[in-house]
Image (tube, grey):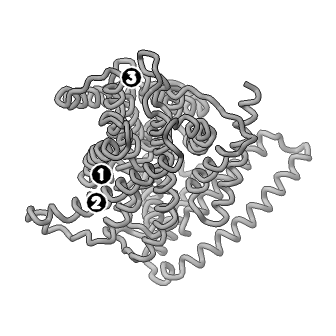
Amino acid sequence: MHENLLLVLGLLFVVMLLVMLAHKIRVAYPIFLVLAGLGIGFTPVIPALKLDPELIFLIFLPPLLYEAAWYTSWKEFKRWKKGIALLAFGLVFLTSLVVAYAAHSYIPGFTLALGFLLGGIVSPPDAVAATTVLKGLKVPHRTLTILEGESLVNDASSLIVFRFALAAILTGAFSMQQAVGQFFVVAGMGIVVGLALAHVMYVIHRFLPTTPAIDATLTVMTPYILFLSAEHFHYSGVMAVVSGGLFMSFRSHELFKTGGTRLNMMGVWHTLIFVMNTLVFILIGLDLPEIVRGLGDVSVFQAVKYGVFISIISIIIRLLWVFSTAHIPRWFSSREKRKPSLGWKNPLIIGWAGMRGVVSLATALSIPLYMSNGTAFPQRDLIIFITFVVILITLVFQGLTLPIVIRFTKIAELDPILPPHEQHAGIRLRLETVALQRLNEKHSSAGNNSLVKAYAEKLRREIDGHLHFLSSEEVCMNHSSERQQFQQIMADIHNHQRKELFKMKNEHTFTDEAIRKAEHLLDITDLGVAESPL
């Protein structure tokens, strides 16, 4: 146990170094992680690490899905629901179907049920991979919204396909009519369970005397509660987590009582999800030598060939589907003809962004080792190996070439939206105007309070500043260089302030608690400077 823990910590440290190197050379870190997993797995000095596949699925999937749901904009999700649904359901089912028949006909000994199992595993693209690769690139807001919404719902649809295929293999019986009916019952009741328990967690956060630490702990517990409760009744734990996460995200402005609670929670979740994303790739790397040895009569060359074959099919299906759904409806619907055409650039980027990642890995690893009669699960190691090859090809090849595709297309914003700095200024203007109106209407009797006076004057200055910024074309044109210079100056000032706080620690005038609070305020100020246009 101690050796395994030391091994995991050592590997995590190595992965952190790789992530820092990826940031340094400006390459998306999931690409480095999948290559690291490949290299680590075949390092002779690294011992094999055995973990229960069901445990891996339970540990990793609920928080990954919940985090994706939490950061999904419900407004944008509703706005582009048609495009998201076509990718998240239509494309997933089509990919699963084509991969199933292709694997059945091309791979010896691969039954149709095993093909559907593989299709359910490799059909969903990964949100982390796509958003990390696209970070910092000029991509239309609609494109990002559709990709993020797709990656949220397609996990649910693909995992339901996976579960039905797994049940068919374990029981030896499968009925399409029964499966379709069960799909709606399992998915629908999963949503009901998720929403019901999300309301319970909402009441706890909203009305009970929680603390920042308790709130953060409850948010980590919530996806597991949703998932396990739905699975206990044989409903979709995935749909429960997704629906519950969307509800909690939509009501998040009512849940947490202080800014400190939100900052604490965000820090916990960023760290948790980052570590989970890295651990999944480490685990597949550690298990890869055992998987290769378990291929049996299938050579590594043949297994790689099968993986490349499935990868090519998955990429082609996605490109064909995206272009078809973007343009074919315009041929038959006058309503669609009135809408601006998406052209070829946006569909190309969405089609090329179908990189597989941690959900596929965790799902593949969750395949049981043995059948219900005690025999080894058929083709388990080959399925996991093919999954790893698909991830390697889509993540590394498509991930490295996607920025090139975006630069080549020179795609412009599809929908009129304000630049980020103007949005920030507009939001701050609205909030500070509301604050000043509230002071004048509700708290005018406190006009003699010197602190309230100072705050009101501060609000007036900031409102004038935002109005000047939004109305001045010259300021907007020169804003980028001025903001960068301002941020550098403030970073230097805050650095010297932190040095001064360090000196105060050696004095007896201020307590450590007071100094820590001052450091926290500096951190919040840093964040404000980074976000503020002024």
The residue carrying pointer 2 sits among few (fewer than 14), some (14 to 19) or many (20 or more) residues within 10 Å by Cα, namely: many
Q: Are marks 1 and 2 in contact (CB under 8 Å)?
A: yes
Q: Position of residue 244 (x, y in %)?
A: 38, 33
* Distance from Cα at disc 1 to Cα at disc 2: 8 Å
Crowd band around label 3 with a 10 angstrom C-alpha radius: few (<14), some (14–19), many (20+): some
Which circle, 2 or 3, is nearer the viewer?
Answer: 2
Identified at 52% across, 70% down, the residue is 465
Please give the residue where the numbered disc 1 appears in the rendered image.
87
Distance (Cα) linking label 2 and label 3? 33 Å
Image vertical order of residue 481 relative to residue 294, above or below = below
Q: Is residue 298 left or right of residue 506?
A: left
User: Which residue lies under the disc numbered 3?
Assistant: 231
Residue 160 at x, y percent in the picture: 33, 34
Q: Earlier in the sequence, mark 2 or mark 3?
A: 3
Q: Is residue 505 visible?
A: yes
Q: Residues within 10 Å of mark 1 (few under 14, many from 20)?
A: many
Viewer-proximal residue among 172 and 274: 172
Q: Amino acid at mark 3?
A: Glu
For the question of whether residue 263 can be seen, the reply is no
Q: Secondary structure at mark 2?
A: helix
Task: Answer with the quarter of the image where residue 97 lies.
Answer: top left
Measured Cα–Cα span from mark 1 to mark 3: 26 Å
Say whether disc 1 or disc 2 marks the residue closer to the N-terminus: 1
Horizontal side of 251 relative to 192 (left or right) equals right
Q: Quadrant of the N terminus?
A: top right
| Mark 2, residue position | 322
Q: Earlier in the sequence, mark 1 or mark 3?
A: 1
User: Looking at the image, which residue is at 47% across and 72% down?
Assistant: 404
Q: Is residue 410 above or below residue 91?
A: below
Residue type marked 2: Val
